[in-house]
Amino acid sequence: MEIYKDLSSPASKEFEKLLNSQLSKAKIEEGKIINGKINKVTEKFVFLFVEGLKSEPVLDINELKSMGLADKIKVGETISVLLEKIEDKNGEVLVSASKAQKIRGWDKLVEAYEKNEPIMGRITSKCKGGAIVEHVDTGSLMFLPGSQISDKPLKDISHLMNEPQKFAIIKIDKIRGNACVSRKEIISSYKKEDKKLIIEKYKVGQIIKDAEVKGLSSFGAFFNVNGEIDCLVHLQEISWSRVNHPEEVFTKIGEKHDLKVISVDKNKLQVGCSVKQLTPDPFERIDEFELNKSYDFKVIKLMDFGAFCELVDLQGLTTLLHSSELSWTKKNVSAKKMFKVNDIIKCKITEIQREKRRVAISHRLTQENPFETFAKNYAIGSIAEGEIVNKNEYSLFVKVGDLDCDCFLHVNDLTYLNNGEEELAKYKKGDKIKVKVLEIKIPEQKIRVGLKQTMPDPFDYFLDKKKNQTITVKIVSTDNKGLTVQPENCSLNFQIKKSQIAINAADARPSRFTGGERIDVAIADLDLQKQKVTLSIKLLEEIEKKEALEKYGTSEGSGKSLPFSTLAADLKKKDKKKE
């Protein structure tokens, strides 16, 4: 112990220098992966020598066996461990071989993901939504979604369990340390290379013999071609005729049909085919058919807006019969109520657009226009007998004869005498009436008739009358607004306003009359064309007053017996003017 008494001695300094140089060879840090050499093996533990550590790290022998390192459990072998603590509370070194393996395995997974390289793994167990895959090299566990197990649905994956196979890493979560892999991508990549070679065999226009129906969907039919590739025949490429679903043409899975290649997409590795293009385009024969000529059409589909029909003499040519071309008279008519599928109906071809491959047809043009027939049979001004078939709050609809058209009868054309709405209430469906034809508009499909025009016009009473003429009327009723009167030998009632009863405001009282009196009135206004008349008692007084002034103006006392209170004063003023 003499050497340690004096640390300043040359021997002590030389020993310190030697010790420091030995420890500095290996940098020991917690959290790092280090290599340890086995120098002792017991039944339960393995002792490692790590240069730079003051004591030997110890590993559980079962840990190494569970990691698949049983063959390395012998003296002299090197094992990688994670240095967790250089010295714990008991003064021992804590290391973990499994954690070191996981860390190095994760680094390998990240490297493979960044380089887009496949890894080897085996499916060890099933879980919710997929399966667990173990990395063969490192033992790291990864998630395999059910959708990524294969390129086609698999009910049973027992044949894939614990079999080493390639997987593609499709997702890495570095924060959580999770990895997601795909077996489907590996399979698809192999098939993709093979599919490129297969796609190159097919050219546009090529005829494929005996392709087998593999599946049917709402948008088309899938065919297997020569057992090497699947192709789609779109719904529009199945037939020249309108097809609602492939089941209408292909009755069962497995039946065989010839196909024509119409597109080849080398990027998407898809081949598009057609069945209808193996037959002539029916539109090429459209010149055989004339405009405005009737042909037989077969109803193949009914819609809310019309019906799709196929020309019987040219199968495959489908066109729309719009609801507006179904009937001359019916509004909002429904093809579903008029026809049923497979009905043969007559239609006229009204338009052919070769560029748009469109043919317009009409069913109503094959029928006689009832409005034209009506115009031939009934001239404007003629009387026709009809039946009320409908009514609303302001009109009646009258059907004349057997013609499929309704005539419009407005409430104002019902009567000359009463209120139109009150008169309208007297009529109901099924009533027979005679009407006069007032107006016919064939393009607008409109016929207007009148009922009151079939009766004598009470306004004819005024044909020989003129303005300011005096007529005799009977007072029908009175109210606060005035008088209701009816001229003699006339069935019309007229209103005399309160302001037109008398010159003096005090005498302009409707209460002066009780009703039933016969009085004379003057015609204040008369419009024969508009059938408007204005009657006035006040005007008659003014006329009579003027006549009295002219006739009796020289007599001072004249006018005393007249019913005009101001007449005497007016006469005096007139006499003074003469002086």
Image: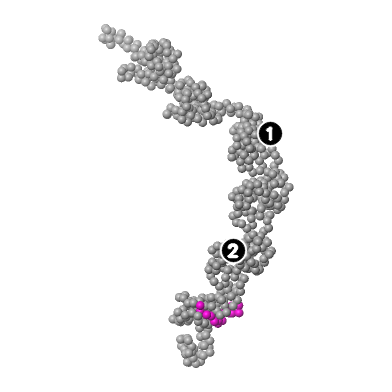
Task: Count neighbours of disc 2 (C-alpha within 10 A) and say few if under 14, some if 14 to 19, many if 20 or more.
Answer: few
Viewer-side residue, 323 vs 195: 323
Quick one: quadrant of the N terminus? top left
Residue 265 in the image: state x and y as whole percent. 62, 34
Residue 530 in the image: state x and y as whole percent. 58, 72
In this rendering, would 121 be left or right of 98? right
Residue 424, located in which quarter of the rendered image? bottom right
Asked if the magenta segment contains residue 521, the reply would be no
Q: Residue at x 64, y 64 (%)?
A: 400
Q: Is residue 422 above or below residue 260?
A: below
Mark 2 in CB contact with mark 1 (< 8 angstroms): no
Q: In the rendering, which numbered label is found on residue 207?
A: 1
* Region of the chain picked out in magenta, as a range: 462-476
Asked if the magenta segment contains residue 464, the reply would be yes
Q: Is residue 145 above or below residue 238?
A: above
Which residue is labeled 2 in the image?
A: 430
Q: Is residue 320 above or below residue 185?
A: below
| Residue 476 in view | yes
Residue 48 in the image: state x and y as whole percent. 38, 13
Q: Residue at x 61, y 72 (%)?
A: 455
Name the front one of labels 2 and 1: 2
As shown in the figure, which amino acid type bears the numbered disc 1? Answer: Ile
Residue 369 in the image: state x and y as whole percent. 67, 58
